[in-house]
Image (cartoon, grey):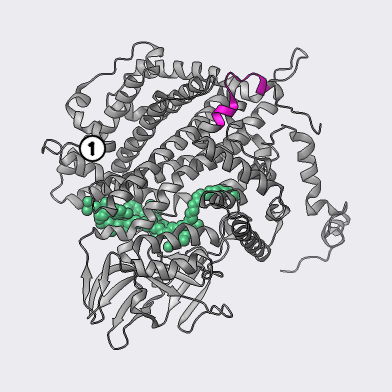
Amino acid sequence: MEGVDHLADERNKAEFNVDDMKIIWAGSRHAFDVSNRISRFVATDPVFEKSNRALMTRKELFKNTLKKSVYAWKIIKELRLSDEEGIKLRIFMDQPGFLDLHWGMFVPAIKGQGTEEQQQKWLSLANKMQIIGCYAQTELGHGSNVQGLETTATFDPKTDQFIMHSPTQTSSKWWPGGLGKVSTHAVVYARLITNGKDHGVHGFIVQLRSLDDHSPLPGITIGDIGMKFGNGAYNSMDNGFLMFNQFRIPRDQMLMRLSKVTREGKYIASDVPRQLVYGTMVSVRQTIVSKASDALARAVCIATRYSAVRRQFGSENGGIETQVIDYKTQQNRLFPLLASAYAFRFVGEWLKWLYTDVTQRLEASDFVTLPEAHACTAGLKSMTTSATSDGIEECRKLCGGHGYLWCSGLPELFAVYVPACTYEGDNVVLQLQVARFLMKTVSQLGSGKAPAGTTAYMGRAQHLLQCRSGVQKAEDWLNPSMVLEAFESRALRMAITCAKNLSKFENQEQGFSELLADLVEAAIAHCQLIVVSKFIAKIEGEIEGKGVKKQLKNLCYIYALHLLHKHLGDFLSTNSVTPEQASLASHQLRSLYSQVRPNAVALVDAFDYTDHYLGSVLGRYDGNVYPKLFEEALKDPLNDSVVPDGYHEYIRPLIKQNFPSAKL
Ligand SMILES: CCCCCCCC/C=C\CCCCCCC/C=C/C(=O)SCCNC(=O)CCNC(=O)[C@H](O)C(C)(C)COP(=O)(O)OP(=O)(O)OC[C@H]1O[C@@H](n2cnc3c(N)ncnc32)[C@H](O)[C@@H]1OP(=O)(O)O
Ligand SMILES: Cc1cc2nc3c(=O)[nH]c(=O)nc-3n(C[C@H](O)[C@H](O)[C@H](O)COP(=O)(O)OP(=O)(O)OC[C@H]3O[C@@H](n4cnc5c(N)ncnc54)[C@H](O)[C@@H]3O)c2cc1C
């Protein structure tokens, strides 16, 4: 029934103030106000309509994305939106496109790697969108191995120019978003060669297309790489290819903040770490973590509301059927994902702080925390995007058959989200960076250099290697120090075991290659510890609002104990818990599920998502699912006519058996 809240009973059960939780979720009252206002603005503007995009052809979808992106930019300018408001507008627009790469990578790359003069020149154009940029690093032959890139930028002292060249087919740039059809410029990563010497990969600003008629400049071959996974979804983005044929750019278009080439062709490296050339990736990995919580929260919101609406079995005595959310199996699959969405939110907030801190330190030439910032952004990007991709798919299954319908919103969300496991660094490759960092930290234990930050727990190695968990009853698993100790001893013992196994190899690199799978497991254990510890820090801090803290505590322990259950092999094999303690954890989990159950719908309402943003018939705020499923079905082009196109050509001849006989 239209106008009726089918989930009102669920909302009345809530034991906390949802409005207060909305502020916690958003991060502050101000952030909530901005999100709330911008999401409603987008939801009511017909230009941002998106329900029809699955039926669009690639060309229509691309053009529709251009229209929305340019309209969004016009609104940002005309209404003088702040940066924060502009970002929200792009998020709620909910259609990947060139704006993401222009603002998310091109501009930050120039800010991070350009000199003052370069920033002045290029950012003034980019900030007004008089040029449109992308981030062209990956090549057909190399993505993960950045040092293996083949594109060359050879300095020609005669003309004071760099000659950009793609020497092989595998050196073609391949994948950059916005490159295929839109960008006029790119930050291109290429091997710098001066006086015949290769100085490794550096960034260059390169104009690709004419600013008059958009045609590629002579010496440049460019296009779109073709359809990607899923209908609609990420196909709104023009991921592109690019080849250079001896294409010349002025010397001052090399990004020269970190190193320089003089007029004479002399290469001058500054004393900052060369890894700062990877700085844009670090910044984006950090934002991907909060985006993970957002994407997972969308899926969980849909699955939770639908699980409260959907009923199956239990009416044997003539009563009403059971809401599927009341099945313990449903709770055991759904509530850990709900808890993960909150966990990723809080670790995302912390990571933002860490990133801001390292940025300020770098500006003051303090590079001490750079390795930890790299390990945390890489590891948490990897861990949260893998969990979110799996979580979205689990939410689809939690919605049964209807979850497979496009209008559930879940197939598209999955298709758009899942490349996050690959872009900005393949998730396995990134965990191996964490593993290297951990092995280095372990090797320095006892050297007098105390581990700091997220590896500080390794400084208590003597205790953590010997301790036995003190959990004796189920409630002990609600004791933060007992939970933390179990996660710390598991992570440390896995890291130490890897280090011991590594030391058996004469050649460390060969040992590392042999032990890759174990190293990834150790890195994941460390990342999970970070997330658990930041969630615990959150619930131990000041939290306002009636009943809010209690709910967050429940979710925090669900998150931790569910991980313990899922990775029980690690916890048992490292003797971090006993089988009896593990079974007490399962008992405690069931009790926590029962406590979350009456609050589940309110906990997803706290995300404050509009129906437009969710884009899901199953996740509608009012729970009016069935009539809307019918409405959606009737909109399908196949239902335009009662007798389908093709009836006379195929179905009728088949039924009447009067088709010409087949010839071999
Ligand atoms: C329907 C709508 C639904 C809506 C859903 C919404 C969801 C949207 C979600 C998110 C939106 C976000 C938008 C994103 C858009 C996608 C755009 C994608 C862009 C890209 O992919 S750009 C290309 C990214 N490429 C990579 O990430 C490559 C990965 N490879 C590397 O980073 C490196 O090559 C490496 C780290 C793997 C290895 O580098 P290298 O060989 O040089 O290094 P090593 O020899 O291993 O190590 C040397 C030394 O350096 C340290 N190091 C390495 N990297 C860094 C770094 N970045 N910072 C600091 N230090 C670094 C490393 O640890 C070593 O240190 P030690 O010597 O051991 O001390
Ligand atoms: C949607 C999307 C958007 C993108 N946007 C951009 C963009 O805007 N700009 C840009 O420059 N790039 C972009 N990329 C490219 C992206 O950054 C790369 O695809 C990514 O870094 C992974 O690199 P790869 O493709 O070379 O994977 P590969 O490295 O070839 O990975 C293949 C397999 O090998 C494994 N593997 C690789 N190396 C190792 C190792 N050392 N140890 C163990 N296993 C290993 C991986 O785990 C993976 O299973 C985008 C990609 C996608 C999918």
How many neighbours does mark 1 have within 10 angstroms: few (below 14), some (14-19), or many (20 or more)?
few
Describe residue 332's horizontal placement relative to residue 609 as left or right: left
User: Please, is residue 353 above or below residue 221 in the view?
Assistant: above
Q: Position of residue 345 (x, y in %)?
A: 47, 37
Query: Range of the magenta residues?
Result: 10-22
Q: Mark 1 = which residue?
A: 452
Q: Residue at x 57, y 77 (%)?
A: 214
Image height of 650 relative to 151, above or below? above
Front residue of 377/71: it is 71
Q: Main secondary structure of the magenta part?
A: helix
Identify the residue shown where x is 62% and y is 27%: 601
Q: Quadrant of residue 535?
A: top left
Q: Nearer the viewer, residue 482 or 318?
A: 482
Say left or right for 354 vs 655.
left
Say what amino acid the circle numbered 1 marks.
Ala
Where does residue 373 sit, x and y in percent of width and height?
Answer: 31, 46
Q: Outermost residue, left direction?
A: 447
- The answer to whether any part of residue 253 appears in the image is yes
- Where does the C terminus fall, quadrant-wise? bottom right
Element on which disc 1 rests: loop
Q: Position of residue 57 (x, y in %)?
A: 68, 62
Residue 531, x across and y down, in percent: 39, 34
Residue name at image x 75 percent, y 33 percent:
624
Quarter holding residue 597:
top right
Residue in the image at 35% along x and 51% along y: 429
- Image-quarter location of ligand 1: bottom left
Quadrant containing the N terminus in the rendered view: top right
Residue 633 counted in the magenta span: no
Residue 377 vs residue 74, the one in the foreground: 74
